[in-house]
Structures are given as structure tokens and as C-alpha cells.
Amino acid sequence: MNEALITLDNLSIGYNSRPVLSGISLSIARDSFTAILGANGSGKSTLLKTLLGLLSPVAGRIETATPSGAPLVFGYVPQATQFDPIYLLTGFEVALMGTYGRVGAGRFVPPVERSFTRECLGAAGAEELAQKRFAELSGGQRQRVLIARALATRPDVLVLDEPTAGVDTTTTHAVMEFISKTRKERKITVLLVTHDIEVVRSHARQVLWLHQGKWLYGTADELLGAERMADILEMVIS
Amino acid sequence: MEALGQILSLDFLLRNSVYTSILVGFACPLVGVLLVMRRLVFMGVALPQISSTGVAVALSLPLWLGFDLTDHGSQSAHMLAFVGSTMFSITAILVLAFLERRGRGHPEGRLGTAYVVAAALSILLLSKNPYGEAGWLDMLKGEIVTISNFDLLLTAGTLALVLAVLGVFHKEFLLVSFDRDMAITLRKNVVFWDVLLYLLIGLTVSMAVLSVGPLIAFGFLLIPALTAHLFARNMRQFTMLASLNGGVAALLGFWIAYQYDLPVGPTDVVLLGGIYTTGWAAARLPAALSWGSRNAL
């Protein structure tokens, strides 16, 4: 097991000081692939937003440790449906936003960052989408552009919020294969929120399972065996 | 064409009005593009009206305090109106944006109420103000007639400042508007960029209201941006088409108004409306024709 990159210490998450989930204590290892699983309203997105700094913890702490001591860089891949189609942005312009964290306010994006963005689009299989309007792309195509944008941040952690929601089976397979390959090649830690147990079984090493205010953390093999799953669901129901 | 030649000549009596009208025509749509993208169209309606209430309050203040504004010349009155207009529009946009971000209540209801109360208050205040009779009521109706060199310079300076800041920080404003969550994960200070953007919008609105009145300010803020969105393929085309549409319409509007002795402001807005309607029909024409030919087969 690699050293801990993110440590949650007795963390409570929620909105307006009202906790949805409490007492979460666990460590996420460097280069790991962790799936956050749970039904609607179980707190998956709330946990993700808290980790990303979009929400403040209700209680407890989140500790991060990078080798250089620099703040952790998150490559965030939100749900592709959340973007307003009124913005007339091309795939390249959306992906280029990933570099903005390294470019000072009021400065032009330098050519080296532009060419790195093209590389990321190529790596995500979205090269041909660069000049197309983002709002007119299919769900799977948008997802690829957003993954390229996340890669363009040069992330320590790739955070994906239901990247295969509303995407067909073939594209789901392609997107998940790409994410797994990228994790191995670039030594990136992956946090994936999903409903899809099959995707978790095929790709994730660790699973954080949230349900009705409770949480379980373990390896995919431990938590996703048929008998163990039945036990968990029965325990939760009872 | 003779009238156009007269309007563009350097010794034309109302040349400052022409220049101001064109400046507002080119500049306001650039701010309007941001209002349209952030789905703040109703804000674009309410803000100019609130800004004009600021003008009315500022001009009523000396009267309430017992000063005679006519002793201090038109520049003092204009500066006072500028301060009142700017303070009201910036305060209003910050408060309304804060309430909208909290996501509670009914934003349309708030904006509608703000608009109608501000409009009524402006009329009430100016009806009791002797300066209202001396031209301010005309300004609020959109009669761009008497613009001094000082007014023109103030308008040009303010709009140049706004456009320079918008241009320099274009990528920050775009990121914060398009994907706020991404901006936070990249450690951008989203509150700072939001407040700066609102300050620029407030400043532009107050300057436009002071120069050409709330009706035209609203027209130039939103209609060119909405028209440009029908045809633009990318953000650069969107902003350039919007600005060009506003600037050309301002010049044409002034020409038509001068030729047929019409008030300039309402002429500009009707012209912008006509361009938008024609553009909307033209943008949908190919789809309508192909639907018609499919059904004919």
C-alpha cells in the first residue's frame, strides 16, 4: 500500500452546518483508484464537493500530503450535463481552462500550455473535438473533453463525478479503460463517484460505500462479493 | 446621405451626442454579453432603472439640503448625478447578485419589484425637482441632445477603463462564469472576480444611463448581445458581432432620428428590436425551408 495522500479525520459533511454523514475517518493512498458508491442522496456528491473545497466540512479535518509540500492539485471532471449551452466555447477552449491554474491573472496562456492542452485532448481521444462547439457534443464526447481539461491541470488527484451517467455501454467502457490507463501511466490518484457497480468491480481497488448515514471502506473484493453485498444491504435495511 | 454627412462632420452642433451614442453602442453590448451568458437578463432591465433612481436621488439631495445647484454649473450637477447613479447601480447589483447566489426566494419577483419601484421613485423625485424640468426628465426618457465635452470625456474615460479591465481579465471572468466549481478547485478567488465583474457592470450601466438614459442603456446592453448569439460560432465572434451591432445601430439610429426629427433613444431601441427580429427570422429560415420541402415531398 502506498503512503496516504488524503486523510479524513473524523469528518462530518453536510449543508448549512447540518451533517449528512458523520465520523468519516480513512486514508486514500497515492496512485490508488477509489470508487465512492451509494444511492441518490447518500452524500456522494457532498463528500466530493467537500474534498474539492467547494463545501466546508461541518466538523473534522481533511489532511493532504504531497511530496513537495505544495497544495494538492485536483483535476475535477463534473457531470457533462451541468454546463449552460449559451457559452459558445469549443472543445479546445474548455480543455484550455485546465491550464488557468498555472497562468497568472491577466496573462495570455503561453504556447507551451496550449500545446500541452492539445496533448491532453489527444490522450483523451478528443483531438477531433477541439474545434467543435462543446455544447453540441454528445455526452461521451463532452466527457472526453472534460477529462482532457482535468488532465491539463497536471493533477495529483483525478476526481470524477459520475462520468458515465447517460453514456452508452460502449462509451462507458472506453472512458473507464482510458481513466484506468491514465492512472497507471501518470501515477494519478483517482476518485470516482458512480452508481455503476460493474464499473467499480472492473476498475476500482478501494470502495467507499455510503448509505443512509453510514459508510464502509474497504477493497472492492471485500465489499463487492455477492454475499458481502447482501449482508451490507440487509444490515442497512435492518 | 446628406444628413449622414452632416452628422459626421466635425462642426455638427450635436456631434458630442453622436459620439456618446456610438461609444455607448459599441461598449454596452460587450458588458451585455456577460449579462446574457450569466443569465442575468432581468438584471439588465432592472439595473438601468435603479441607476436612474440614483440620478434622481443625487439631484434631489441638494434641494433637500437647501443648496442651489444652478450656482455650481452643469459639471457639478453631472458629477453628482454620476456619483448617485454609480452608487445605486453598484449597490443594487451586489445586493441582487448576493441574494441570487443564496438561491432563496424568487429572483424574478425581486428584480421586477426593484424595477417598478425604482421607476416610480425616479418619476416622483424628479416631478418635485426644478432641475427635472430643466432636462433631466428628458434624459431619463432617452433624449440624447445636450452632451458637453466634459460629459463626453467622462463617458469615454469610464467606458475605456471598463473595457480595458474586461479585456485584460477576460479568461478569469469566463472561467468563473462558465464553471465556478472548476475555478474554486484551481484556487481562483471567485468572490473577488464576481465582485469585480459586478462593479464593471454597475459602472457601465450608470455611465450609459447618465449619457443616454435607462431605456437606451437597457436596449444596448441586451439586444445586440441576443442578436449576435443567433449567428456567432465562438466567443470572439459573439463579442465582436454584439459590439459591432450596437455601434452601427447607434449611428444609424441617430441618422434616422435626425432625418425624421424623432427622439434618438427610442429610435435606437426600435432599430435594435427590428435588427433582432430580422436576425431571428433569418437564423431560422434555413430550418423552416427544409421543414417545408420535407413536408412537400
Image (cartoon, coloured by chain):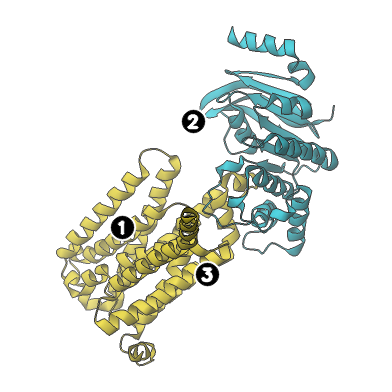
Q: Are marks 2 and 1 on the same chain?
A: no
Near mark 3 (Cα within 10 A), the count class, few <14, some 14-19 or many ≥20, is some
Q: Which residue is mark 2?
A: A16
- Amino acid type of the residue that numbered disc 1 sits on in the rendered structure: Ile
Residue B289 visible: yes
Near mark 1 (Cα within 10 A), the count class, few <14, some 14-19 or many ≥20, is many
Q: Which chain is assigned cyan?
A: A
Q: Are marks 3 and 2 on the same chain?
A: no
Q: Chain of mark 1?
A: B
Counting from the top left corner in percent of width and height, residue A58 is at 56, 28
Q: Which residue is mark 1?
A: B50
Counting from the top left corner in percent of width and height, residue B83 is at 34, 65
**At 26% across and 55% down in the image, what residue appears?**
B118
- What mark, if any, has residue B29 been given in the picture? none
Check disc 1 and report its element: helix, strand or loop: helix
Q: Nearer the viewer, mark 3 or mark 2?
A: 3
- What mark, if any, has residue B240 been given in the picture? 3
Colour used to depict chain B in the structure image: yellow
Q: In screen coordinates, is B47 left or right of A205?
A: left
**At 40% across and 63% down in the image, what residue appears?**
B223
Check disc 2 and report its element: helix, strand or loop: loop
Q: In screen coordinates, is A84 left or right of B69?
A: right
Q: Chain of mark 2?
A: A
Task: Name the quadrant of the C terminus of chain A.
Answer: top right
